[in-house]
Image (cartoon, rainbow, N blue to C red):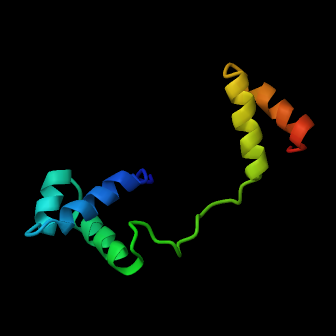
Amino acid sequence: FMTPALSVDLKERIVQLYAQPGSTMAEIVKTLDCSIGLVSKVVNLHRVYGQVTNPTKHRTGCPSFLDHADHHYLQTILAANPCLYLDEIQHKLATVRHVD
């Protein structure tokens, strides 16, 4: 069971709170109802990289079969017809974009 990814907004809020004079990690934990480990990790990432995510960490999992143009095509056809069924979308991808 994997925990859901935490939003960038929450991580940025941690940095904002930590930047306030006199703010402690323990107070942030209580305010945002998160773990001390998360607060520490986010503050450290911000200190090292100047952002709340690790830019050197690569996405895990299988590589995507769809490229940027395929994603754009999907967004376009769904914007034009939001009621398409999955099989119709798959058929359009196969015939127009040659994605199996």
Height in image: 66 above or below 89?
Answer: below
Q: Position of residue 34 (x, y in %)?
A: 23, 56
Instruction: Name the residue at 19% across, 52% down.
Output: 33
Question: Can residue 6 be spotted in the picture?
Answer: no
- Residue 77 located left or right of residue 12: right
Q: Position of residue 96 (x, y in %)?
A: 90, 37
Q: Position of residue 13 (x, y in %)?
A: 27, 56
Name which quarter of the figure residue 17 lies in: bottom left
- Residue 39 located left or right of residue 25: right
Question: Can residue 90 be spotted in the picture?
Answer: yes
Height in image: 89 above or below 2?
Answer: above
Q: Position of residue 99 (x, y in %)?
A: 85, 44
Comparing 50 with 54, the one in front is 50
Name which quarter of the figure residue 93 lies in: top right
Instruction: Name the residue at 44% across, 52% down.
Output: 1
Instruction: Name the residue at 32% across, 53% down.
Output: 10
- Residue 96 located left or right of residue 1: right
